[in-house]
Image (spheres, grey):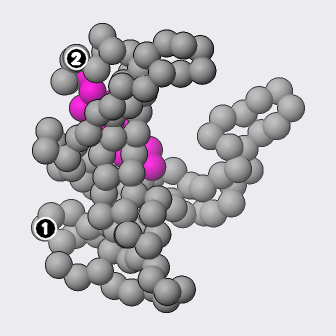
């Protein structure tokens, strides 16, 4: 999240072969957006043998900060529709990256504009 610019970016990593499948790419991005919009903030995204995630918030991190093109606030009941709305070819960027293991992967991103952004330590409402 870029609080100064008022954006939230979601990215997924795919193999070069997977990234050629537009349907799969869209599905993976939509799932990631929906998860971000409906999941509570926690210390970790997954449990390990030595540490389990602890909830930091009881509400999703972007609750009340996004709205559909129709002006409706995004919530858990319309998150899937919102994800479908923003995951369009004109909003998707891709980049080939090389992992520490030497393998190439394709980073697919989509960026959402948030209603609130922080500027000079003050929250301001973003208007369009």
Q: In the rendered image of this protein, does residue 121 appear above or below residue 113? A: below
Residue 23, image x and y in percent? 19, 24
- Residue 84 visible, this orientation: no
Residue 112 lies left or right of residue 59; in this view the side is left
- Asked whether 101 or 28 is in front, the reply is 101
Picture quarter containing residue 31?
Answer: top left
Picture quarter containing residue 35?
Answer: top left
Residue 1, image x and y in percent? 47, 59
Q: In the rendered image of this protein, does residue 5 appear above or below residue 43? A: below
Residue 25 is marked as none
Q: CA distance from mark 2 to mark 1?
A: 31 Å
Q: Which residue is mark 1?
A: 70
Q: Which residue is mark 2?
A: 20
Residue 34, image x and y in percent? 37, 46
Residue 53, image x and y in percent? 72, 44
Magenta residues span 24-36
Figure quadrant of the C terminus: bottom left
Residue 69 lies left or right of residue 102; in this view the side is left
Residue shown at 31%/52% (left/top)?
Answer: 111
Of mark 2 and mark 1, the one earlier in the sequence is: 2
Q: Nearer the viewer, mark 2 or mark 1?
A: 2
- Residue 3 visible, this orientation: yes
Q: In the rendered image of this protein, does residue 96 appear above or below residue 73? A: above
Residue shown at 43%/26% (left/top)?
Answer: 97
Q: Residues within 10 Å of mark 1 (few under 14, many from 20)?
A: few
Residue shown at 38%/69% (left/top)?
Answer: 5
- Asked whether 47 or 111 is in front, the reply is 111
Picture quarter containing residue 8?
Answer: bottom left
Q: Secondary structure at mark 2?
A: loop
Residue shown at 59%/14% (left/top)?
Answer: 101
Is the stretch drawn in magenta largely helix, strand or loop?
helix
């Amino acid at each position: 999240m870029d609080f100064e610019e008022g954006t939230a970016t979601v990215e997924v990593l795919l193999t070069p072969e997977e990234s050629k499948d537009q349907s799969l790419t869209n599905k993976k991005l939509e799932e990631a957006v929906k998860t971000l919009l409906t999941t509570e903030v926690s210390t970790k995204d997954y449990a390990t043998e030595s540490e389990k995630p602890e909830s930091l918030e009881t509400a999703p991190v972007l609750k009340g900060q996004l709205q559909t093109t129709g002006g409706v606030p995004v919530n858990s009941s319309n998150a899937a529709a919102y994800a479908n709305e923003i995951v369009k070819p004109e909003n998707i960027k891709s980049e080939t990256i090389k992992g520490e293991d030497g393998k190439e992967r394709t980073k697919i991103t989509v960026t959402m504009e948030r209603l609130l952004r922080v500027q000079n330590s003050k929250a301001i409402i973003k208007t369009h």
